[in-house]
Image (tube, rainbow, N blue to C red):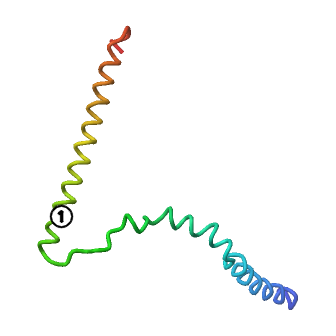
Amino acid sequence: MGGPNLEVFKFGLYLFVPVMALLHFGDPAWYHNHVLPYKDHLFPPPSRTYSKIPTDQTAIREELARIKADKLARRMEREKELQAQSEAAVQSSKGWFKWW
């Protein structure tokens, strides 16, 4: 088989890899340069999170009504934009090549 030299090399490698990983990834500068920007990209900022969860039934119903109203407003805005785009497409197709 490999012999004692191979075993010493494997033991050194088994110690070297985790220690070097801890030294590289445990550096505070690396953490601030690579982890914190990704965290800000991945999670919403605290100002956008809602931390006051309603506990009684009336507050829950009010919150659901507000969410439904927001969804309806966004849907109406999206439909209005789609209608404007379709009207623009119809107007732009009235050119010389209108059979295309």
Up/down of 12 relative to 53, above or below: below
Q: What is the total number of numbered labels drawn onto the structure image? A: 1
Relative image position of residue 49 (x, y in whole percent) = 36, 67
Relative image position of residue 72 (x, y in whole percent) = 20, 50
| Mark 1 Cα shell of 10 Å, populated few (<14), some (14-19), many (≥20) | few
Q: Residue furthest left?
A: 58
Q: Residue furthest right?
A: 5
Which of the 4 image quarters holds residue 48? bottom left
Rendered residue at 16%/71% (across/down): 59
Report whether 57 appears left or right of 87: left
Report whether 86 appears left or right of 41: left
Relative image position of residue 46 (x, y in whole percent) = 41, 69
Up/down of 59 relative to 14, above or below: above
Relative image position of residue 84 (x, y in whole percent) = 28, 30
Up/down of 31 relative to 18, above or below: above
Rendered residue at 29%/28% (across/down): 86
The quadrant in which the N terminus is found is bottom right
Q: Residue furthest bottom?
A: 4
User: What's under tag 1, amino acid-wise?
Assistant: Leu
Q: Secondary structure at mark 1?
A: helix
Rendered residue at 32%/30% (across/down): 85
The residue nearer to you, when weighing 41 against 89, is 41
Which of the 4 image quarters holds residue 96? top left
Q: Residue under label 1, please give it.
A: 64
The quadrant in which the C terminus is found is top left
Q: Residue furthest top?
A: 96
Rendered residue at 31%/18% (across/down): 91
